[in-house]
Image: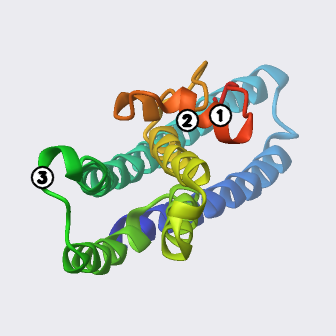
């Protein structure tokens, strides 16, 4: 909140500065209109140098503040995304590892996780998580392929939010990291052809 206030205050000051510069320039040009041409040119050049310097400093500070806010957001998001993916992997690998979460584990995780995720999750990631949860509640067993693709979409959106391009990735490529025959599963029931997703 403090950072947001600083950015707003900076923008207000920048607007006030621009208006002040315009006002002073108007007065200045009126005042130097009667001066000798060489003196007037020197004054205009000096004023221009000062104005450019001030604008450069103010704009630099604003960009620096914005970068700081983005860095703080990223630092908050990463642990939340890792927590979500860790839980999903635990759930998916439960049969192999013998650590399948109980219904209470799932409820406790979702109740705790959603609180932080609502605040720090990016819009597209939040939407992908909502779609995945809706599908899971309705009954993923009725549409295994759809559930798998929604999971992959969620992971893809997380990667995009963290700066990855997902370039040249195909449907199922991310899922193949933990589901061995995923491309066979994706192609057989629906006739889906793999396609670039980035």
What colouring method underlies this structural image? rainbow
SS class, disc 2: helix
Would you say the residues marked 2 and 3 are in contact, meaning their CB atoms lie under 8 Å apart?
Answer: no
Q: Residue at x 51, y 43 (%)?
A: 152
Mark 2 sits on what residue? 185
Q: Indicate which disc, 2 or 3, sits on the residue closer to the N terminus.
A: 3
Residue ID at (49%, 32%) = 182
Q: Cα distance, mark 2 to mark 3?
A: 24 Å
Disc 2 versus disc 1: distance between alpha carbons? 6 Å
Q: Residue at x 31, y 57 (%)?
A: 84
Count up the numbered dots: 3
Residue 198 shows in this picture: yes
User: Which residue, given by chain and number where applicable, does mark 3 sit on?
Assistant: 98
Measured from the top left, where is residue 132 in percent x and y? 52, 62
Label 3 SS = loop
Q: Nearer the viewer, residue 76 or 135?
A: 135
Relative to 65, say whether 193 is above or below: above
User: Helix, strand or loop at disc 1?
Assistant: helix
Q: Where is residue 39 shown, x and y percent of the image?
A: 73, 25
Disc 3 or 1, which lies upstream in sequence? 3
Front-most of residues 154 and 119: 154
Circle 1 is placed at which residue position?
188
């Amino acid at each position: 909140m403090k950072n947001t206030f600083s950015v707003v205050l900076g923008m207000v000051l920048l607007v006030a500065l621009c208006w002040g510069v315009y006002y002073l320039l108007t007065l200045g040009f009126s005042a130097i209109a009667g001066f000798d041409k060489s003196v007037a040119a020197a004054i205009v050049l000096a004023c221009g140098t000062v104005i450019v310097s001030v604008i450069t400093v103010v704009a630099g500070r604003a960009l620096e503040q914005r970068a700081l806010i983005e860095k703080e957001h990223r630092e908050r998001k990463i642990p939340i995304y890792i927590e979500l993916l860790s839980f999903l992997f635990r759930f998916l690998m439960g049969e192999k590892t013998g650590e399948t979460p109980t219904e209470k584990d799932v409820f406790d995780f979702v109740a705790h996780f959603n609180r932080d995720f609502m605040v720090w999750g990016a819009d597209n990631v939040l939407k992908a998580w909502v779609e995945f949860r809706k599908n899971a509640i309705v009954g993923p067993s009725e549409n295994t392929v759809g559930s798998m693709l929604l999971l992959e979409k969620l992971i893809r959106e997380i990667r995009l939010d963290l700066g990855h391009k997902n370039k040249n990735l195909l449907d199922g490529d991310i899922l193949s990291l933990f589901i061995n025959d995923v491309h066979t599963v994706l192609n057989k029931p629906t006739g889906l052809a793999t396609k670039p997703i980035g």
